[in-house]
Image: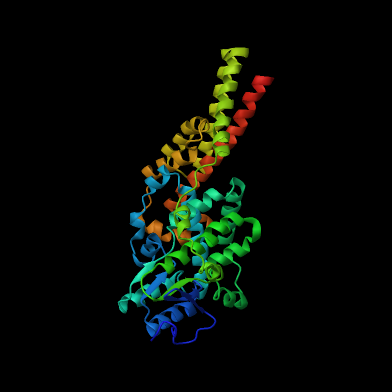
């Protein structure tokens, strides 16, 4: 069989053929929750016997699909130290959203990618993992999204989890032809363009370059249907020099750093001025008010999250201090203490996808309770910063 004649069968609706130099690439656009996609991938690879099978997966996601004990490798303490709890929560929410839709169709998310890997292995065909590291993708997405839109994203994902409305037959049919991630982006409309750029557009480019540089002359690439159109437009361009940039996490902007340090400096400066202008007694009262205004709401957040008593105590102690530095927040301190005092077990990691869709599950599951601790103690500290700051300024100018 020659390159020009391959593939030998016609799959007009789901397979797009691209010729690149001496290679020919069959791009299969799949829905990650469709049994039809699973069947197509298996049949196509068995019939066409390509030189290489490329997958829209990175090492981490591949391990998650193929290894039953993937949660045991997750180090929560390192994640908290690296301040990545927010991206982990977003990842869990998106995975749960996809799993909920998949359950309505009787297919596990990513089943077609797993089938492609298994079929290739059985036929001794090399597999190439062509997606960007999911941790880099999520961190780039998180950093590219503004503070308010981060809240909108999480709120939208959480709202979708508790939506128990039935999906119509028409909607199910539509989802079978689409990538769930693209469906989610469409539901959010144009409100999160930066998120779409990172999750879809950047990965279109990354996937296209990795697939073009995979070994073999006849390549089958299995990707979500939402990536096909974008990839088809850029296959003919050489974007290899952009891969390094797409694999880096952008630094925190100077404006954010300046604002982050400006708030504590203004608070501390105001306390010093109060002491100089109105005496140590008024300054002492202001400091005490700052401690209580930060510590009490943060501790209440810990109580509401049913945190360990030591976690609640750490919220009261940490909030007044962390509010005066942008380096770390009270939420991360409390989450770390909660992990140390009430570490989740593997079963709770595995059940987090289903527990996350119920109100009770957030408190019952110790992994999800860590996120509650992180969010509620952090929110309490933020409230305390505004309340305490208002009191200090009132003392200074009153």
Residue 243 seen anywhere in this rendered image of the structure: yes
Q: Is residue 397 depicted above or below 294 in this figure?
A: above
Residue 357 seen anywhere in this rendered image of the structure: no
Residue at the farthest front position? 21
Q: Position of residue 229 (x, y in %)?
A: 56, 70
Q: Is residue 327 depicted above or below 207 in this figure?
A: above
Q: Is residue 115 depicted above or below 390 in this figure?
A: below
Q: Nearer the viewer, residue 204 or 196?
A: 204
Q: Position of residue 185 (x, y in %)?
A: 59, 62
Residue at the farthest right position? 398
Instruction: Tell me the residue at 45%/50% (across/down).
Output: 248
Placement of the N terminus among the 4 image quadrants: bottom left
Q: Nearer the viewer, residue 20 or 116?
A: 20
Number of numbered discs overlaid on the protein picture: 0
Instruction: Tell me the residue at 45%/60% (across/down).
Output: 240
Instruction: Tell me the residue at 49%/37% (across/down).
Output: 330
Q: Where is residue 254 in the image (x, y as percent from the top left)?
A: 55, 38
Q: Quadrant of residue 51?
A: bottom left
Colour mapping: rainbow
Placement of the C terminus among the 4 image quadrants: top right
Instruction: Tell me the residue at 49%/80% (across/down).
Output: 36
Q: Where is residue 99 in the image (x, y as percent from the top left)?
A: 49, 66
């Amino acid at each position: 069989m020659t390159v020009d004649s391959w593939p030998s069968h016609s799959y007009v609706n789901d397979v797009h053929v691209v010729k690149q130099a001496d290679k020919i690439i069959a791009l299969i656009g799949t829905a990650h929750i469709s049994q039809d996609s699973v069947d197509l991938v298996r049949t196509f690879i068995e019939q066409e016997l390509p030189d290489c099978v490329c997958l829209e997966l990175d090492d981490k996601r591949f391990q998650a699909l193929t290894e039953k004990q993937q949660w045991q490798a997750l180090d929560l303490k390192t994640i908290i130290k690296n301040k990545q709890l927010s991206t982990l929560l977003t990842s869990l929410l998106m995975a749960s959203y996809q799993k909920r839709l998949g359950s309505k169709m009787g297919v596990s998310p990513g089943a077609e990618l797993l089938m492609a890997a298994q079929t290739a292995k059985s036929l001794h065909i090399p597999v190439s993992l062509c997606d960007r590291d999911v941790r880099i993708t999520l961190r780039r997405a998180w950093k590219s999204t503004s503070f308010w839109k981060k809240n909108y994203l999480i709120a939208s994902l959480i709202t979708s989890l508790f939506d128990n409305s039935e999906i119509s037959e028409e909607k199910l049919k539509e989802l079978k032809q689409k990538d769930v991630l693209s469906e989610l982006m469409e539901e959010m409309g144009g409100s999160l363009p930066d998120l779409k750029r990172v999750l879809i557009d950047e990965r279109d480019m990354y996937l296209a370059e990795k697939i073009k540089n995979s070994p073999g002359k006849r390549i089958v690439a299995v990707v979500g249907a939402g990536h096909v159109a974008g990839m088809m437009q850029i296959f003919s361009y050489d974007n290899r020099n952009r891969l390094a940039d797409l694999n880096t996490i952008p630094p925190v902007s100077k404006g954010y750093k300046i604002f982050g340090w400006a708030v504590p400096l203004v608070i501390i400066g105001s306390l010093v001025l109060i002491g100089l202008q109105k005496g140590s007694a008024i300054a002492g009262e202001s400091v005490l008010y700052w401690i209580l205004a930060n510590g009490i709401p943060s501790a209440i957040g810990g109580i509401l999250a049913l945190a360990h008593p030591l976690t609640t105590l750490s919220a009261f102690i940490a909030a007044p201090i962390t509010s005066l530095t942008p380096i770390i927040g009270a939420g991360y301190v409390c989450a770390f203490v909660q992990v140390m005092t009430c570490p989740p077990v593997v079963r709770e990691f595995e059940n987090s996808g289903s527990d996350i869709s119920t109100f009770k599950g957030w408190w019952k599951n110790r992994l999800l309770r860590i996120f509650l601790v992180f969010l509620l103690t952090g929110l309490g500290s933020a409230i305390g910063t505004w309340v305490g700051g208002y009191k200090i300024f009132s003392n200074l100018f009153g």
